Image: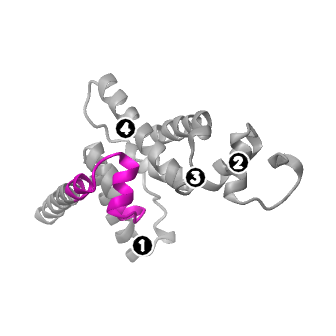
Amino acid sequence: MPGFSAGRTVWTEAELISAAKAGDRAAFDELVRRTFVDTFTLARRLTGNEEDGRDVVQDAYLRAWRGIGKFRGEAAFSTWMYRITANAAATNVKRRRRQQADPFEDDLEPADQRTDLQPAAMAESAEALERISTALDELPPKLRSVVVLKDVYDLSHEAIADELGITVAAAKVRLHRGRRKLRDVLYDEGAEAHAV
């Protein structure tokens, strides 16, 4: 099979994977291009901040490049990347915990202050999304990863179990616990806001 850079314009994922397994870096780069947004979004949500998300994405794609020969093709490349990204995020979070003396720092980007561009409903929606994002960041990584994979990526319990290397029962338990903690955090924030 000729390499990816041979000039053809449309390649299937299977053809790109085959070329990447043969050492074609351009084919792997195309796989990265096709999956980057979803991979970065997952990494950002699992780590809780953009900088760590970037580190995780870099680590995940490096692991994928090194391990492309082991990819069996039983699932989509993006599904394989979810698992690698979740593992890289878990490693990143553990490393950060060992390095960090302070618990969580408030590393949130400032909201867009141009109120003329944000109708009231959009502002309320953005505020709600920010509260949810902050609450997700407070979840332990094991719970956060299951909640994100289920509620953001809409993966089945079976797919989550497979991606994280846990049982389906453990995935269901972690999802229940994660959602409960999320609800508790969001409810407490809401109650505090109304009490002020």
Residue 133 in view here: no
Q: Residue furthest right?
A: 7
Q: Can you identify the residue that label 1 sits on?
A: 122
What kind of colouring is applied to the model shown?
one colour
Which amino acid, by three-letter code, is at mark 2? Ser
Task: Name the N-terminal-most of marks 1 and 3.
Answer: 3
Task: Name the N-terminal-most of marks 1 and 4.
Answer: 4
Can you say whether 43 is above or below 180 in the image? above
Instruction: Give the crowd class for mark 4: few <14, some 14-19, many >=20 residues within 10 Å.
Output: some
Q: Main secondary structure of the magenta part?
A: helix
Task: Name the N-terminal-most of marks 3 and 2.
Answer: 2
User: Helix, strand, or loop for circle 2?
Assistant: helix
Q: Are marks 4 and 2 in contact (CB under 8 Å)?
A: no
Q: Which mark is residue 187?
A: none
Can you say whether 31 is above or below 130 in the image? above
Task: Name the N-terminal-most of marks 4 and 3.
Answer: 3
Q: Which mark is residue 18?
A: 2
> Where residue 132 appears, x then y in whole percent?
31, 59
Foreground of the two, 120 or 40: 40
Q: Can you identify the residue that label 4 sits on?
A: 90
Which amino acid, by three-letter code, is at mark 3? Gly
Q: Can you identify the residue that label 3 sits on?
A: 73
User: Helix, strand, or loop for circle 1?
Assistant: helix
- Spatial separation of the CA atoms under disc 1 and disc 3: 42 Å
Q: Residue at x 61, y 40 (%)?
A: 68
Highlighted magenta segment, given as a residue range:
150-175
Which amino acid, by three-letter code, is at mark 1? Met
> Where residue 116 appears, x then y in whole percent?
49, 70
- Spatial separation of the CA atoms under disc 1 and disc 2: 45 Å
Instruction: Give the crowd class for mark 2: few <14, some 14-19, many >=20 residues within 10 Å.
Output: many
